Amino acid sequence: MYPYLIPGKALRACLRAALPVLLLVLGTSGTVAAGDTAPGWQLSGFGTFGAAHSSERHADYSSSAMKASGAGRSHDWSPQVDSKLGLQADLRLGPRWSGVLQVVSEQHLDYSYRPRVEWANLKYQATPELALRFGRIALPVFVAADYRKVGYAYPWVRTPVELYGAIPLSNSDGADLTWRWDGDAVRGTTQVFAGRTTVPLFAGAHLRGSGIAGLSQTIERGDLSVRASFITTRLTITLFPELFAGLRAFGPPGQALADSLAVEHKRATGTSIGLNYDPGQWFVLGEAGHYAVDAYLGASDSAYASAGYRHGAFTPYLGYARTWGKPPAGPHALALDRLSPSMAQAGALLNASVGAMLRAIPSQSTSTLGLRWDAGQNVALKLQFDRVTPRAGSRGTMMNLGPGFRSGRTAQVTSATLDFVF
């Protein structure tokens, strides 16, 4: 339906990637059970077909640092920014055991649409209030953590990149314990989790989080929901090996600089709090967080606020998001004054590369105006206009920079999506 919203090549790539998974699920599953506790399965899915345009011609606007291209420099109208397909199989194995498998196809850093397993876990319902899960589990660090890939589930075209881009990881392999409790006037959900994750990037590079641990607390009172979370991990990212090898060739000072900047088993932490007030005809959403890595990724404070009003099938909304980046402590360049001319020249090139790497710590603001139209059952069309401004010399969340890019210049980003669930 509505295939004109996404260019044919990207649509075919999404479908080719998701089709083998769909056939696998259909070929190995049985029928849905009639009872709530009898063994059975249920297949569902979701997707977004979209296109985005950016007025910035010297960089790409993207919804995630885990994608290879976006709108602006690489494509006049880009389907890669928002398009994705997902399939989910929910399994009931008995009165206490259940499982879920979710696979998502979207663009990756290697330009492929290869489907990846987003969730794959078994759940043991020990009591009506207490549940334990094992396997690949969603990281519960944002208000939209459980549905951040499902565009139909939230009002905007995409979750605010200033906040959600701070932790592009959405799952971990491990276990979690969830306790749901009721008070006199509130309901609560307490979740503790632990695990690890490895994400392939491109050409042998990878991101690895070991010793992931955290806590999430949700409180609900009437139409108000509040969620707070904390996460910590040891992070390794195998990018820029030539840069760090070059720094280490400059002896102890270069070795110290490389060790302080490289993301090699470095402590990373994140805290966030968000609220959602939705009495029905209108809603207010907001989140804020602080994230820090003891390496070149630095630290950031991020927040957004959004509101909308439902009028029949139409929901106009607006929002504002901001992130403030902070470079890591310590020296950020080699001292060149006592070096030979040839070494000083090589050191200057390395210093320029380090400076470019640190400018990737995002400082950015986005003002948003949009309209959602629930055009049919389980189908929503969205139009959104964003004013995106990288700040403080940063590139913000822009990528694939050209020589003409300038921090502080506002990009006008126009997006259209078709979101659906089935």
Image: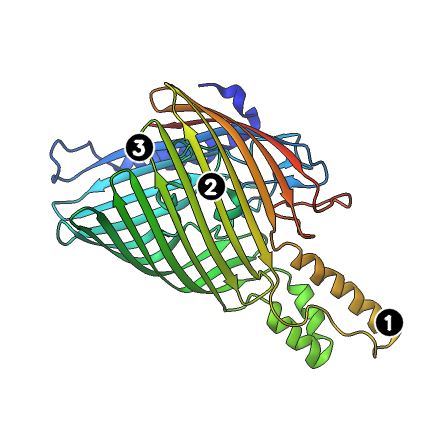
Q: Which residue is mark 2?
A: 305
- Density class for disc 1 (Cα within 10 Å; few <14, some 14-19, many ≥20) is few
Q: Position of residue 14 (x, y in %)?
A: 48, 33
Residue 293 spot, x, y in % from top left: 52, 64
Q: Amino acid at mark 2?
A: Ala
> Between residues 178 and 112, which one lies in front from this camera angle?
178
175 over 256 or under it: above or below: above
Q: Earlier in the sequence, mark 3 or mark 1?
A: 3
Q: Nearer the viewer, residue 36 or 191?
A: 191
Q: How many marks?
A: 3
Q: Earlier in the sequence, mark 3 or mark 2?
A: 3
Which residue has dot 1 on it?
A: 342
In the image: residue 35, left or right of residue 313:
left
For discs 3 and 1, the disc positioned in front in the rendered view = 3
Q: Give coordinates of residue 371: x percent, y percent.
A: 48, 25
Q: Check if mark 1's residue and mark 2's residue have beta carbons within 8 Å.
A: no
Considering only vertical position in the picture, is 220 above or below 328?
above
Confirm whether residue 247 shows in the render: yes
Q: Name which residue lies at 67% across and 55% down.
A: 359
The answer to whether residue 64 is visible is: no
Q: Could you tell me which quadrant the C terminus lies in?
A: top left
Judging by the rendered image, the residue that carries numbered circle 3 is 279
Q: Nearer the viewer, mark 1 or mark 2?
A: 2
Q: Secondary structure at mark 1?
A: helix
